[in-house]
Image: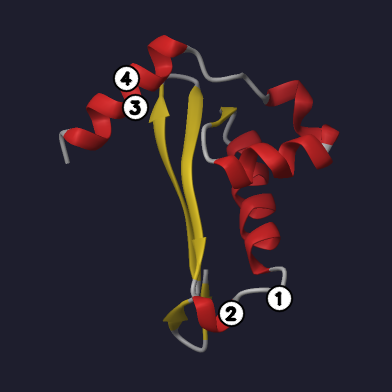
Amino acid sequence: MAIDGFRAGLTAYRDRGEQRVFYHTEVDKAHSRKGLAATLVEQALNDARATGKRIVPVCPYVARFIKKHPEFDDVTDQPTPQLLHWLDAELTAQ
């Protein structure tokens, strides 16, 4: 998410087959407490749904957001130990 041409926040994910695994969300401190994280995550989740992906909330912020927004329950999978192992390998290989 950009504001005035500068990156104000991001939500990071990796795709694994039909799943989009969200593992990190951050908002620049200059823009915190303005609801940007919620807007960013909601847009990312809507994009995942629109592209036919299932959502896996590894990121604590994304997990909390989904708990407050049950409209995403139909496209949400919970992280499994196998998925977490896969994600760790993906992120380590960077």
Q: Is residue 57 above or below residue 62?
A: above
Q: Quadrant of the C terminus?
A: top left
> For the residue labelled by badge 1, is the local secondary structure a helix, a strand or a loop?
loop
Crowd tier of the residue under label 4, counting other residues whose Cα lies within 10 Å: few below 14, some 14–19, many 20 or above: few
Residue 26's tag is: none
For marks 3 and 4, give the CA distance. Answer: 4 Å
Check disc 3 and report the residue beneath it. 87
Check disc 2 and report the residue beneath it. 31
Which amino acid lies under the numbered mark 1 shown in the image of this protein? Lys
Q: Is residue 20 above or below residue 68?
A: above
For marks 4 and 1, give the CA distance. Answer: 34 Å
Check disc 1 and report the residue beneath it. 34
Q: Compare marks 2 and 3 and give the one earlier in the sequence.
A: 2
User: Which image quadrant for residue 88?
Assistant: top left
Q: Image point 84% across, 33% down: which residue?
A: 70
Crowd tier of the residue under label 2, counting other residues whose Cα lies within 10 Å: few below 14, some 14–19, many 20 or above: few
Q: Position of residue 24 (x, y in %)?
A: 46, 47
Callout count: 4
For marks 2 and 4, give the CA distance. Answer: 32 Å
Q: Image check: 47 left or right of 4?
A: right
For marks 3 and 1, give the CA distance. Answer: 30 Å
Q: Give yes or no for contact between labels 3 and 4 (Cβ–Cβ under 8 Å).
A: yes
Q: Give yes or no for contact between labels 1 and 2 (Cβ–Cβ under 8 Å).
A: yes
Crowd tier of the residue under label 3, counting other residues whose Cα lies within 10 Å: few below 14, some 14–19, many 20 or above: many
> For the residue labelled by badge 2, is the local secondary structure a helix, a strand or a loop?
helix
Q: Compare marks 4 and 1 and give the one earlier in the sequence.
A: 1
Which amino acid lies under the numbered mark 4 shown in the image of this protein? Trp
> For the residue labelled by badge 3, is the local secondary structure a helix, a strand or a loop?
helix
Q: Compare marks 2 and 4 and give the one earlier in the sequence.
A: 2
